[in-house]
Image: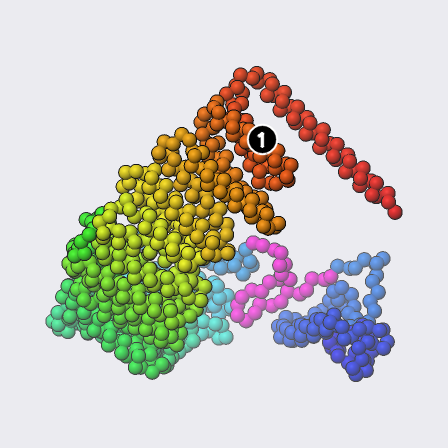
Amino acid sequence: MRYADPTRCPDCRDELPAGVPVCPTCRLLVRHPLAVDLFSTLRRADDLVEDLRTASDAFPGPALSASATAAPLGGALVPPGAPVTPKRSVPTPPASMPATPAASSSGYASSTGPVDPSRTGVSVSSIPKILLGLGAFCLLTAGVIFLAVSWSALGVGGRTGVLLAFTAASLSSSMLLHARGLRIAGESLSIVGLGMLCLDVLGAGAAGWLGDGSRGWTASCAGLLVAVAGSALGLLRIGSQPRLTSPQVLAGAGLATAYLGAVAASGHDLLVAHVATVLALAVAWVGHRATEDALLRSAAIAALLTWSGGAIVALVQGLLDPTLVQLWRDGTGWSLIASAAWMALPGLVLRERRLALLGAAGAAVVVTVTATLPGIDGELTSIGMLALVVTSAWLVALAALPAAVRVVAVAPACAGAAILAGISLSTMSVAFVRWTDFLAENPAAFDRSIGLRLSGPDAPASPLQLVPSLLVIAAVVALLGRGRIGRSAVAAGAALVTGVGAAVTLMSYDVALALPVGALVLTAAGCLSVALRGSGAAATGSGVLGLALAAIATATALPSAPLAALTAGAAAVGAITLARLRDDALRALGGLAAAPFVGLAIAATVHVTDAGGAWVAVPVLLGVGILALALPRTEVEMAAGVTALFALATSLPHVQDAGGFSSLWLCVAGFLCCASALLTPARRPLGGVGLALLLLATWVRLIDLSVRQPEAYTLPLALALLALGLWRLQRSDETSTVTALLPGLLLVTVPSLLWVLSDPISLRALVLGASCLILTIAGAALRWNAPLLTGAVVGTIVILREIGPYAGAVPQWVWIALAGAVLTGLGITWERRVIEVRRTVGFLGRLR
C-alpha cells in the first residue's frame, strides 16, 4: 500500500472522482495548498519505506526470533488513513533490544545498538585505533631499547636471529590479523614490522655489513627497503579484505629517506635526484594502475620532493656559474632538461590532458630558464633585456597558440612578466628617489627659472627598458583577460603605460624638469580624452586617472613658476571640461578639481610677474569666484571656498598691512556672494552671507584705522537699506520685515553695540538703549518681527553689560532666592496646566 495515492482521499481513503476539489465523503479540501504539501510529505514517506526495505533485505544478521516478532516496537502497525484509538489506561510495554548484528566482512566492528545522536565522546570505532596505535608505538620503542641495551651482549648470530624474529613476527602477525578481518590491528603491526625492518638495516650497517658504515648509505638502504616492502605489503590482497593503507604511506616516506641518505653519502646530488624521481614516479604509476590512492599520493609527494631538490640544486649551480661549460659539459643544463621532462611525463603516461598541459607549462618554464642562463652576466640591464626578449617571444606564442594548448605559454609568459615587473619597480623607485631629492633641494615653490634640471642617483638597470617592459606586462595582462577586457580599455591602458613610463624614464636622467612634466601632461590629456568620449565606469576611471596624473604633473612642476602655471592651467581646462559634462560622476570630479587647479595656475602666474606672495590671495579669490559664478554647483563652490581660504592663509604672512588686506579680501568675497545670489535663484541665501562679509570688511577696516565713531560710516548705508526695505514693504504684502528691514537694523545697532560692550558707561550706550526701547515698542505696536527682535535682543545685551559690574556687589543669597522663585513659579504653572488638561480630557470623555 502506498501512502501517497492521488486516487484516494488522504483522510478517509475513499476513491476520489477525477477533478473534484473536495472529497465527497469527508469534505476534505484536496486541492488546497496544504493538501499539496501533505502529498509531498507522503511521497517522501514512500521513498523512506523503499529505502528501509532495501536495507532490510541486505542486512546480513540472523532472522528475528519468534518472541521478537511477536512483540513489535510500539504496538501493531495500522494502514494509512485507518483510525487509531490511543490506549490511555494500558501502559506500553518496553520494547525489546534488537539483536546484535554480526561483524561486517570489511573487518570494522559495527555498533551494538541504535546510535544516540545526543551522545558525545570518543566513538566506539576510534577506541581500537587509539589502543593499537599506542601498542605499535610501544613495541617499536621496546625494540629500540632492547637492541640498544642488549646489542653488545649478543653475538652476530644472536643479533641476526633477534632482528629477523621480531621482523617476521610483526609482518606475519599483521597478515594474519588482517586476514581475520582485524584491519586496524593489521595496519598497526605492519607499521611495527616495517619499523623493525629499518632496525634490521641499521643494525646491519652498524655491524659493517654495508661497507664503510656510512650513515647516509645506511639510511638510503633502509628507506629503499621500506619503500619496496611497503609497496609490496600495501598491494597484497588477502581474500576479500581491502589492502592495507599504512604500508603504502610508508613507501613514499621510504623513498624520500632513501633520496636524502643517498644525497648525503654520494655527493652526486643531480644524479641521485633524477634516479630517485624515476623510482618515485614508477611507484606512483604502480599505485595508479592498482587504483590505490594512498600509494599514488605518497609516491607523488616523494617524487615532488626529489624533483624539487634536483631542480633547485641545478638552478643554483647554473646561476653561480652560467657558462656553457658548466651547463652542458658538467651536466647542469642536462639536469634541468631532465627535470623538465619529468614534469611532462606524468600527464603523458596517465593520458590526462589537463595534467599533461600543466606539466608542459612547467617544463616550458624550466627549458626557458636553462636556455637563458648563459646570457646572464650579473648586470641587471642584461638580465632585463634578456627577460624582455624571451617574454616577448612567449607573448607571441600566447597570442598565436590555439586555445586548447594556450595554457602551455601562460606560465613562462607570467614568469617573464614577473621578472620585468621587478626590474621596472627598481627603476621607478630610483626615479622616485631622484624626484624627492630634487624637491628637497628646491623647497621654495614657484622659482622663476624654467630651466631647472633633475639630478640624483642612477638606476640599476637601463631606464630605456622601462617603457617596453611595461608594454609587455600590459600585453600579457590583456591576453590573459582576453574576452573580458575591451579593445578601448586595452588601448587606453597602453597609452597610460607609455606615458607614465616615458615620464619615469625621463626622470631617471639629468634632464630639464619640463620634459617629464610634459610627458605626464600628455598622458593626462589622453586619459581625459578617453573619459570625454566614453561612458560608464570606464569613463569615470579614465577621468580619475587623468586628474590624478594632472595633479602629479602640477606637483612636479611646482619649483618652476612658469612651468607650474602652464601645467596647472592645462589641468584646469581639463577639469572644467569634465565639470560641464552630463555624466554625474565626471561632473563631480571635474567640479572638485577645477577650483584648486585654477587657484594654483593664478598663484603661479602672480609669481611669474614677480608680484610676490602678498598679492596671491585676492587674484585667486577672484578667479575661483568667477568659476563658481559660471558653474553654480555645490562641489564647485565648496572647492572654491577652500582654495580661497588656503590662498588667504598663505598670503597673510607676506602682507605688511594685514588689516587692510583682510578687509579688501572680505569685500571681494562679499561682492562675489552677492553676485551669486543675484545671478542664480537657488543661491539667494548667499545674499545674506555677502552682506555679512561686507559688514565684516567694514568693521575690520574701521578697527584697522582705529576709528572710534563707527556710526558716521554705518548710519548712511543703514538708513539707505531701511528706506529700501520700507519701500519694498509698501510694494509687496508678501515680503516679511525680516527680509526687508533686518539687514538695515543690524547695521544700525550692531557696530554701536560692539563699542558699548567695551565702554558701557557712555552716551553711546544711553542712545543705543533708548533706540532699542523705541524699536521694541514700535515692533510690538506694528506687529513687525524685525524691529521687535532687534530691539529686544540688542537691548537685552546692553542691559546685561550695564548690570555686569554691579552683579558682584549683590549678595549671593539674592541670586539663589531669585532662581528659587523662578523655578517655583515654573513648577506651579506646569502643574496648573497639567490639571487643566486633565479636566478638559475628562469633560470631553463625558460628552455623548
Q: In this view, does 769 lie to the left or right of 118?
A: left
Q: Is residue 743 left or right of residue 629?
A: right
Residue at point 48%, 56% (across, down): 680
Residue at point 46%, 73% (across, down): 238
Q: In this view, does 123 lie to the left or right of 646?
A: right
Q: Which of 394 and 740 is in front in this view?
A: 740
Q: In this view, does 540 lie above or below 823?
A: below
Q: Residue 552 appears at what percent x and percent y?
A: 29, 57
Q: Is residue 825 above or below residue 474?
A: above
Q: Quadrant of the N terminus?
A: bottom right
Q: Does the magenta stretch include residue 242?
A: no
Q: Nearer the viewer, residue 828 or 6?
A: 828
Magenta extent = 95-121
Q: Main secondary structure of the magenta part?
A: loop
Residue matched to label 1: 773
Q: Is residue 143 above or below residue 355?
A: above
Q: Dot 1: within a 10 Å radius of its alpha carbon, few (fewer than 14), some, or many (20 or more) residues?
A: some
Please indicate, yes or no, whether residue 755 appears anywhere in the rendered image: yes
Q: Which of 641 and 289 is in front in this view?
A: 641
Q: Residue 490 appears at what percent x and percent y?
A: 33, 73
Residue at point 64%, 36% (across, down): 781
- The three-letter amino acid code for the residue at tag 1 is Leu
Residue at point 85%, 73% (across, down): 26
